[in-house]
Amino acid sequence: MSDAPLDLERLRDIMAALRAEDGCPWDRRQDLSTMKGYLLEECYEVLDVMDGADADAHKEELGDLLFQIVFHAQLRSERGEFGLRDAIASISDKLVRRHPHVFGTDRVTDPEVVKQLWHAQKLKEGKGGVADVPRALPALMRAQKVTKRAGRVGFDWQSVDGPLHKIDEERRELLEAIESGDQAAIASELGDLLFAVVNVARHLDVSAESALSGTTDRFVARFSHVEAALAAQQRRFETTDEAELDALWEAAKAELG
């Protein structure tokens, strides 16, 4: 195994060289605003490889993500605000502070109690409220986190029946908005319906983001199956009637699940 601290120092020095006056023109042109998209892309690429068994790919993508962190720290350092060491010290201090059951005298063995202690410590630090959930999160994930935090303080239904009934209510209101033809109202009511569905997912302890992602994956696989079946017959979607497409779709579902 490599000496991690030295390797991190090496990465930091490489980053500084890339940003130096005689460094890389592309890297020198970047700022915090331009780096947002790259950071998000690297996070998603890590998530993609986590679904597989390729450890080398996972290692590579984690390295790419780490480079983003080092890049951001370099940009802040150049502005005299903080450096990589400060970011590492910050997370190290936070981990110790929020794990008193490990680094303190009290010992806890129940994971649920640990979660409660973590949340309580965040509240002591003035964090953990609904307004602290990042707006940049994917919408379904953000909605689920917001409702979860609201539920922690008692603003919640007692069972899944509440959000299930809310789905029916929001569906009726969406139909009324569609009938009115008011696009702003339609968008608002559709958002309310999605929010209610996310609440159902939370009450059932299901990740709405993962559930929708799984459904999308299944749709892609089934659609590709139908597409291949049509191509084998030298046919196109637009020239195939609805009943035939339905039959092909059901066949894809039966074969692929």
Image (tube, rainbow, N blue to C red):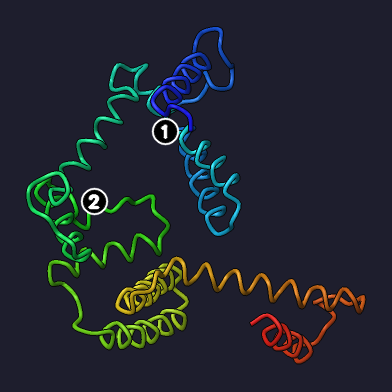
Task: Please name the residue shown 49% across and 16% down the image.
Answer: 19
Q: Which quadrant does the C terminus fall into?
A: bottom right
- Image location (x, y in percent) of residue 195: 35, 72
- Image location (x, y in percent) of residue 49: 56, 52
Dot 1: element: helix
User: Is 228 located above or below residue 61 in the figure?
Assistant: below
Task: Please name the residue shown 52% across and 38% down the image.
Answer: 38
Q: Amino acid at mark 1?
A: Ile
Dot 2: element: helix
- Image location (x, y in percent) of residue 118: 18, 54
Task: Please name the residue shown 38% across and 62% down the image.
Answer: 141
User: Is 160 located above or below residue 210 in the figure?
Assistant: below
Task: Please name the residue shown 38% across and 50% down the image.
Answer: 136
Locate residue 169: give its quadrant: bottom left
Is 145 left or right of 24, judged from the image as shown?
A: left
- Image location (x, y in percent) of residue 191: 39, 70
Is 54 left or right of 161, judged from the image as shown?
A: right
Q: CA distance from mark 2 to mark 1?
A: 21 Å
Give the mark toward the camera: 2 or 1: 1
User: Is 243 located above or below residue 123 in the figure?
Assistant: below
Residue 57 got which mark? Answer: none
Q: Amino acid at mark 2?
A: Asp
* Residue designated by label 1: 69
User: Is 44 located above or below residue 24 in the figure?
Assistant: below
Neighbourhood count class around disc 2 (C-alpha, 10 Å): few under 14, some 14–19, many 20 upward: few
Neighbourhood count class around disc 1 (C-alpha, 10 Å): few under 14, some 14–19, many 20 upward: some
Earlier residue among tags 2 and 1: 1
Furthest-right residue in this view: 234
Locate residue 180: give its quadrant: bottom left
Locate residue 3: give its quadrant: top left
* Residue designated by label 2: 132
